[in-house]
Image (tube, rainbow, N blue to C red):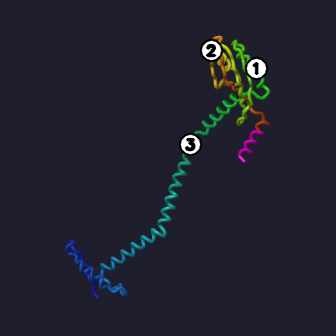
Amino acid sequence: MEAKAISFPKSLSDINFQAILDDFRYMNPHDPGVWPVIPKISVLLGVFVVILLAGWWFVWSDQLAELEAKEQEEITLKQQYLDKKRQAVNLDLYTQQLADIDRSFGALLKQLPNKSEIEALLIEVNQAGLGRGLQFELFRPGQEQLRDFYAELPITVKINGNYHDFGAFAADIAKLPRIVTLNNITIAPLPNGSLTLDAITKTFRYLDDDELIKQKKALQEAKK
């Protein structure tokens, strides 16, 4: 049996569309072996497209999603590696900075008196005002307020004097070896021509070991 040669049209006008339609119309679905060439190719292409779509839907879509997730994970791991590498390179610098912070914190901590020194500090504040010729009309320590590792002691003061003496008193307070601040300052004139200063003076002290333990327990109970 001689094989029938397939001739391809040279232009679109040479295509016999009616013959192609007849090939599809009269082909025997029970005997694909005798189908004309164009229906065979069309069916093969259709099967190929269906296989591609089925593979995409059932296999490749999940694999592509997993691949994308792995790529994102790779980017994250690379960034973490670079961050850790920079930290490792600058480890000596970080260690030096931490040591400097510890020294600075220790120096600040030394400026906080302990419980036994707080009374002497109050006397120093009072004497700083008297040394400038100021008259204390009120000097009333308030209730201590506990913080993380220190206690804050507010002192309500009412002082009479002149403006320059107030400024000198504030400068003397700043020069004390302990931390003392002036807050909520109000200055008003008096009938005799002098001034009166109302303020809240705050000093601080660090908590001892027993107080720190109590403070931690109180914070834990508050969280519960």
Q: Residue at x 74, y 24 (%)?
A: 140
Question: 190 or 82, which lies in front?
Answer: 190
Q: Which residues are magenta?
A: 213-224
Q: CA distance from mark 2 to mark 3?
A: 55 Å
Q: CA distance from mark 1 to mark 3?
A: 52 Å
Circle 3 crowding by C-alpha within 10 Å: few under 14, some 14–19, many from 20 = few
In the figure, residue 130 lies in which quadrant? top right
Q: Under tag 3, what secondary structure?
A: helix
Where is mark 2, residue-wise? Answer: 163
Where is mark 1, residue-wise? Answer: 123
Magenta stretch: dominant secondary structure: helix
Please state the horizontal and vertical placement of residue 187, each as a whole percent of the image: 63, 19
Mark closer to the observer (1, 3): 1
Image: 67 above or below 82? below
Disc 2 or 1, which lies upstream in sequence? 1
Image: 173 above or below 62? above
Q: Under tag 2, what secondary structure?
A: helix
Q: CA distance from mark 2 to mark 1?
A: 23 Å
Question: In the rendered structure, which amino acid carries the disc numbered 3?
Answer: Arg
Q: Under tag 1, what secondary structure?
A: helix
